[in-house]
Image: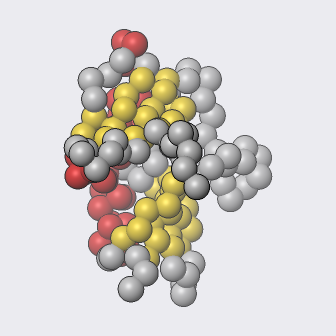
Amino acid sequence: MSTSIRLDCVVLDCPDPERLARFYGALLGWVADEPEDDGDWVTLRDPARSGATGAPIALAFQRDPDFLAPTWPSPERAQMSHLDFLVTDRDSEGRRALELGATLLRDSPGASFTVYADPAGHPFCLCDHPA
């Protein structure tokens, strides 16, 4: 089935778009566009997926001065969404995420994923890459 609609960008609200773009840029090796609207919007793109194969999906960050981070796993302020990243070495990538400013939220023995929060408090998972 052919369609004329495609996902272009996932946007995360946050208090400091440039800081969050630096975190995810370092984590993923993606490149940030120039900040827009006096730094109220920053877009990251995967440099490995640009060119003739089609536009890459972008990850963008939008300033929200009233942003309140989710309190997951507490339901006080529920997460509305989260990002999952496939990794080949979850322990190594987890240490690197922590060094970049992430916070460990849950590491369940025997699970195939570990849950972290980015510097703005959005939960994300590092998931074992299927063999």
The residue at the point 24 percent across, 40 percent down is 31
Q: Please determine whether, in this image, residue 78 is positioned above or below residue 92.
A: above
- Left or right of 19: which side holds 62? right
Q: Quadrant of residue 21?
A: top left
Q: Position of residue 89 (x, y in %)?
A: 32, 76
Out of 4 and 84, give the one closest to the viewer: 4
Q: Please determine whether, in this image, residue 28 is positioned above or below residue 34.
A: below
Q: Position of residue 109 (x, y in %)?
A: 54, 84
- Left or right of 100: which side holds 57? right
Q: Please determine whether, in this image, residue 23 is positioned above or below residue 34.
A: below
Out of 3 and 72, give the one closest to the viewer: 3
Q: Position of residue 127 (x, y in %)?
A: 46, 71
Quadrant assignment for the C terminus: bottom left
The residue at the point 72 percent across, 48 percent down is 78
- Left or right of 52: which side holds 4? right
Out of 83 and 130, give the one closest to the viewer: 130
The residue at the point 32 percent across, 67 percent down is 93
Q: Position of residue 105 (x, y in %)?
A: 55, 62
The residue at the point 40 percent across, 41 percent down is 58
Residue 23 visible in the displayed image:
no
Quadrant assignment for the N terminus: bottom right
Residue 102 visible in the displayed image:
yes
